Image (spheres, grey):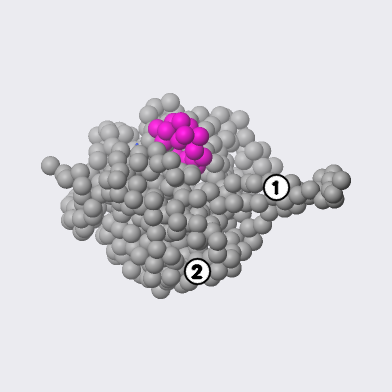
Amino acid sequence: MTDPHQLQVVNPATEEIIATVPAASAEEVNTAVARAVPAQRAWAALAPADRARLLRRFADTVDAHTEELALLEVREAGHTLGNARWEAGNARDLLLYAAGGAERLTGSQIPAPGGWNVTFHEPLGVVGVIAPWNFPMPIAAWGSFPALAAGNAVVLKPAETTPLTALRLAGLALEAGLPEHLFQVLPGHGHTAGRALVDHPDIAKIVFTGSTRTGHEVAERCARLLKPVTLELGGKSPNIVFADADLKAALDPFSFLDNAGQDCCARTRVLVQREVYDEARAHLADALAAVVVGDPADEKTQMGPLISRAQLDRVRSYVPDGAPALRGTAPDGPGFWFPPTVLTDAAPDSPAAREEIFGPVAVLLPFDDERDAIRLANDTPYGLSGSIWTRDLGRALRVSGAVRAGNLSVNSHSSVRYWTPFGGFKQSGLGRELGPDALTAFTETKNVFLSTEGPA
Ligand code: NAD
């Protein structure tokens, strides 16, 4: 039986237990929040330039430990080494961006008869961040670093399966000189530590990244307390490929295989205009066969394992034996391996075509014209990302205007940049992270009216 007070961290490529970490109780969450409250007050009282200086030092410390962080992410999450290095770099770059934001966060003044309005952006207080396992390091960073830069403290609960990189980031923050208890990482279970964080009266905001199902519960609990919440949830994003597109670039299999498909932005619905459908199918068959799946620590590996046996079982349930599909190869085990797969005969209303599988599985669907493409693209409860491939600029603009999703790319599969807003429409979430407004999302706006009336 598993011990509810401990979390076992398993290397998904080998199934070896690589660490055992205490799981925080609700009382420990309360203690962490109680410590964060005075730490936040002192932090917010610093000059913005001093906060920025410490955050830049934190960025330098992360930079100096890139390889260590990347190898930890490889071992606990099965990410390829190249991706894991990018993730450590993303955390560092976001720290630098947020540090600049700390220095530029200003209010405004609005004239009025008999005085002036002065508008301030005040930090919220202590922010709770709840992260999933699929991108442990970047998502810990996206929720936490802009909040810190805006003058808040953060208590972060990483996912049960992947606490190690977040814990290391908290250690590096201390090494860099950030005050104690300002950025605390508490590994724990969702139903104990996660709920305790959401329900805590001194947690001023929750940033939740995870499944849509859990997101609904978190939103309901926050609503009872009128607590602001940002929700970054699931996706089932389209890749819309018109006949005039650069097919090779458009059908890059890593648009849905990156991170073994455990990517909320994965373009797992490959929508291809009918006249190039056969060509697309042949290209994808070759591309899947060429994907190098294996040891994520090997520089040549392009795709690693799934995170856990539970996730492997879930992915398998969407791909029955003998289902018409294009398939690559994967190791047998140990490890949680699933081959790159494109289902070629899934009905547009089937679970495989509509639900988030969160594995290296896409569906290939034909469409007839622009209107049909838009209808299919929007025919899902989600609205996170998507790509549109065409050489016709007018069509690219029309389609990007009509697809209901928060992050689209035209003739590119790029999704997430720390300097642009990120978030979902529909069941993919609520609110935005990153981008120019990343810091103000962690502030309350206060207006003070200053009377200039003299004595009567
Ligand atoms: P999950 O919802 O199971 O868990 C996410 C986090 O919530 C974990 O830390 C978990 O412990 C915690 N949690 C679970 N129950 C809770 C509760 N009742 N109260 C508070 N916290 C609770 O999700 P997951 O399986 O870890 O992550 C995969 C999901 O995350 C996918 O759906 C994926 O699309 C989504 N995701 C979204 C984004 C985005 O930016 N939109 C990014 C990455 C992942």
Q: Is residue 261 left or right of residue 396?
A: left
Residue 54's disc is: 2
Q: Residue 342 appears in which quarter of the rendering?
A: top left
**Residue named by callout 1:** 448
Q: Is residue 387 magenta?
A: no
**Label drawn at residue 333:** none
Q: Which residues are magenta?
A: 217-241
- Relative depth, front residue between 326 and 422: 422
Horizontal and vertical percent position of residue 228: 51, 40
Q: Is residue 115 visible?
A: yes
Q: Quarter of the image for the N terminus: give it.
A: top left
Q: The disc labelled 1 sits on which kind of residue? A: Val
- Let me know if residue 341 appears in the view: no
Beta carbon of the mark 2 residue lies under 8 A of ligand 1:
no
Q: Tell me the CA gap for discs 1 and 2.
A: 30 Å
Queried whether the magenta region covers residue 222, the answer comes back as yes
Name the outermost residue toward the front.
Answer: 456
Query: Which quadrant of the structure image shows residue 264?
Result: top left
Residue lying farthest to the left in this orientation: 1
User: What residue is shown at x 66% (from left), y 42% (from top)?
Assistant: 397
Question: Which residue type carries mark 2?
Answer: Leu
Q: Secondary structure at mark 2?
A: helix
